Amino acid sequence: MADPLLRVDRLVRRFGGILATDHVSLDVARGELHAIIGPNGAGKTTLISQLTGHLAPHAGSMFLGGRDITGLPAYRRSTLGLARSFQITSLLSDFTAADNVALAAQAHDGHSFRFWGNARKERGLRETARAALERVGLAGRADVLVSKLSHGEQRELELAVALATKPQLLLLDEPMAGLGVTESARMVKLLSELRKEVTIVLVEHDMEAVFALADRISVLVYGRVIASGPPSEIRQNEEVKRAYLGDQHVVVKHG
Amino acid sequence: MKASLDVRSLVAGLVAAGLLLLPLYSALSGNVFVLTLFTRIVILALAAASLNLIMGYGGMMSFGHAAYLGIGGYAVGMLAQEGVGSGFVQFPVALAASALYALVIGALSLRTRGVYFIMITLAFAQMAYYVASGLARYGGDDGLTIYKRSDFAGLINLSNRVQFYYLCLACLLGTVFLIWRIVNSRFGLVVQGLRSNEPRMQAIGFPAKRYKLVCFVIAGTMCGLAGALLANNTDFVSPAVMYWTRSGDLMVMVILGGMGTLFGPVIGAVVYLLLEELLSQITEYWALIMGPLLLLIVLFGRGGIMGLLGRLNRG
């Protein structure tokens, strides 16, 4: 196998006496959709936050395309091609949908110490924004304030923002959270298309979606990876069943 | 939305027109005092507009903005004292000193946020206040009298009331125009994005602190200009212009007029200083009336006067 796009090596993060990330090692190959699952409090978001640079690990290292990114701040990782969506929708709520995406495009179009020209009239940025909005099915809502968008639309906008940074690796923190059945189905369809273009690390509670989408799954329990492998393997894994899927057998049957 | 913008633009236009025509009124009515009063209002409106750039658009609640009034003023005063009377030297020095102060203070205080940012900017301004109080050579506590206003080699005469008023007004309108360009530029969108959601902005690739610091320096420099004008206006500069209550006054003007609106701080400054003037003529306890009045506006008119105007229009 070629070098993985993302390599996480024995990452450790403590909160007081609690090991929220307990020597986590993880490889994500280029082009795969790698899902991370685990019960509540397993440390999934803590792990994501360390990958994006919002939280510093206490030990271990991370490599993106072979490059050590452990000590880099969030904005540098973004320039290197790492994009994220937030578990709790985190957009610029007093900006329009198009503004949100255009700013993401702007962040990757040289520095922004330009004080004079009207940025909202820059055709290049607006074009990129429009394309990304179209990609997620929000083209018709471009000029709507984020605070006026529905929850489902905001989740889709999160994706558009991440896409506008032209990422190599997309970290999605529970993109399905809070979505209704129809919206979830739309999101799954969208992700199944996106996965053809970009490597994705998906943290998700919706087991049906995870088993439908993932090439590989890592199971996180109490900050430790207890299993990692293709969905079929994970489904058979006794430890996983005990630790996590035990109370989700309905889903297992479905899967 | 469109119509509400129109009412606000209308009011802004009327205020601007009023300010432009004020010397005419003053000449016709023979009321010299009104021109003096409005020169001060225009200068402080400039200071408020600069504060609005970081506070309203950038979400940086600086409680030490009056420090720049002092720095700009002392640059003029100290140079005059040392025999350098040229405005072509005094004003650039005032701006440069303010920018430098903003750079240092900003680099230190932007490490913090929220209440800590408010407190640290306040603390630095108070430090500047005490430093000025200790400048025995330049009047110390008592302040420094400026015997001759900045000299612009015959280009403009600052001792002429009308000319000086128009200089101040030009500085104000020029600054507001500049701020308008800035907030709609790439830079301005980044700064407003940071106000709205800093982690998000970092996640999409913006080095937050750098942009905030540059914004902080721009605002400080603009306020330094107000300081240089203010010292010329009063022919005097003293530590008192940097006192924390002055910073508070500027904040009130911004909030009263409407944070994050282009013309709000100008209207806020006009209303605040006119009220202060009128009420203090009626009673020496004017603050007792002013306080509740401001409370009402802030409580019921979220977004200040500009916010009220916007809602008025929507019905």
Image: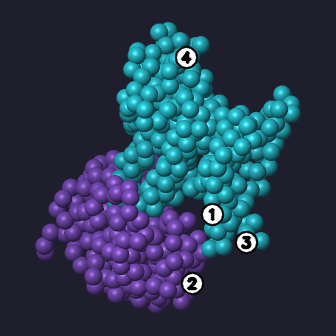
Chain colours: A purple, B cyan
Q: Which residue is mark 3?
A: B314
Rendered view: B274 above or below B201: above
The residues tagged by marks 4 and 1 sit, at their Cα atoms, a distance apart of 40 Å
CB under 8 Å between discs 2 and 3 = no
Location of the C terminus of chain B (image quadrant):
bottom right
- The residue that label 2 is drawn on is A180
Q: Which residue type does callout 4 highlight?
A: Thr
Q: Residues within 10 Å of mark 2 (few under 14, many from 20)?
A: few
Q: Which residue is mark 1?
A: B9
Please, which chain is the residue tagged with disc 3 on?
B
Up/down of B289 relative to B21, above or below: above
Few, some or many residues within 10 Å of mark 3 (<14, 14–19, 20+): few
Q: Residue at x 35, y 75 (%)?
A: A123
Q: Is residue B111 visible?
A: no
Residue at image mark 4: B145
**Element under disc 3:** helix
**Which of the chains bears the disc numbered 4?**
B
